Image (spheres, rainbow, N blue to C red):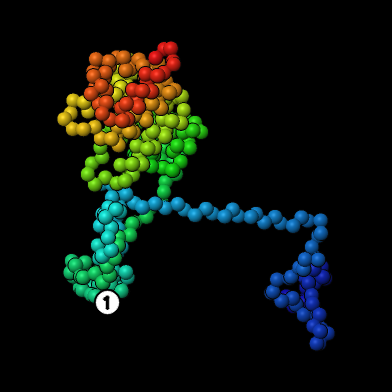
Amino acid sequence: KPEDQQPASVRSSVPQRIDQHTGGVTMPSSAPIRIDAHDKDSSEPAPVVEKKEEEKPVEMKPLVTSSGKYRCAHVGCGKEYDPEDNAEGCCHYHDGKPIFHDLKKEWSCCGARSYDWDDFMALPKCKTGKHEPKMTRAAKLDDLLEKGSLSTLEEILSNDEVVQELRAGSSKLVDRLCEKSSLEGMVKILTELPADGSSDNRKYVLPYVCVELISCDNDIFLDAWVHRDVTTGWSALGELFQAYVRASESEETLNCVISGYMSRAICAIFEKRPGGVASISRSMESSLKPALLALLYDLSVCELLYNMLITTDEKS
């Protein structure tokens, strides 16, 4: 209704503003009313702005294939390669991107094009150089342990946190490492030569990590190494000793690197569990004693025998 026809109570409730030029009264505009900071109730607390924590950079690592090699990230290459055999010029690739328009396929870097997919993929590469590893996000140890059997022992041992977490007594990690399958896997890493073409991680890092884990002095983990199955008599430490027996029966010379890891692992167990080591070695005396004597040409075997013979532990 026109303003003069509205009830007085309604007219008085409508905000008005004075036109400075005409002095007349006009209806308020649709723009929101601005309230300055000094017009607000000073008793109201100022809003607290939470400070966001800086996100940590995502840790990345080279993608390792099932054969222990790296995968090249260059477009047009994608081959598996040994990082130690990565000479200049071994990689042929495109440094641009493929462009697809209708049926035409073209490389943005060199302009090479084709209409057939197979011909397009077979076009000569425009760049040469070294392979670059395809990177993947480094999984956290907790994530690996949560995956259960879906995560491999090699993934767990390759994680940078594994030794520190065992020292801290992580129950999830202890449970996983004490599983028979995990103990069997570590015995294999310590006693068997890696297959040809295996990565440096498998050759040198994993055996070293196994020895470091044994040296962490985790009681449950150490007990698992000297525990003998009541039915089969199997023990992880017995399998380590059995590797010496097999080596003595073989015509090949004992590998000094493998022998070094085995000796260090057994000595670390013997230092904390001398009674358990003595019990298992006595149960294998008929085969173990001649085996160790036959392998005395190996310095690591000599050191192992020396440490066992000079023990002052009464039980062992």
Q: Name the residue under label 1.
A: 111
123, 292: nearer the viewer: 292
104, 69: nearer the viewer: 69
Q: What residue type is labelled 1?
A: Gly
Which residue is rendered at x = 34% and y = 37% of the image? 207
- The quadrant of the picture occupied by the C terminus is top left
247 in relation to 17, above or below: above
Which residue is rendered at x = 30% and y = 60% of the image? 131
Q: Residue furthest bottom?
A: 21
21 in relation to 120, above or below: below
Which residue is rendered at x = 20% and y = 73% of the image? 115
**Horizontal and vertical percent position of residue 53:** 59, 53
Q: Is residue 111 visible?
A: yes
Q: Which residue lies furthest to the top in this view?
A: 314
Which residue is rendered at x = 25% and y = 37% of the image? 193
- Graded by Cα atoms within 10 Å as few (under 14), some (14 to 19) or many (20 or more), the crowding at tag 1 reads few
Looking at the image, residue 211 sits to the left or right of residue 129; the answer is right
Q: Is residue 91 visible?
A: no
- Tag count: 1
82, 61: nearer the viewer: 82
**Horizontal and vertical percent position of residue 274:** 41, 19
309 in relation to 44, above or below: above
**Horizontal and vertical percent position of residue 147:** 39, 39
**Horizontal and vertical percent position of residue 276:** 38, 17
* SS class, disc 1: loop
4 in relation to 71, above or below: below
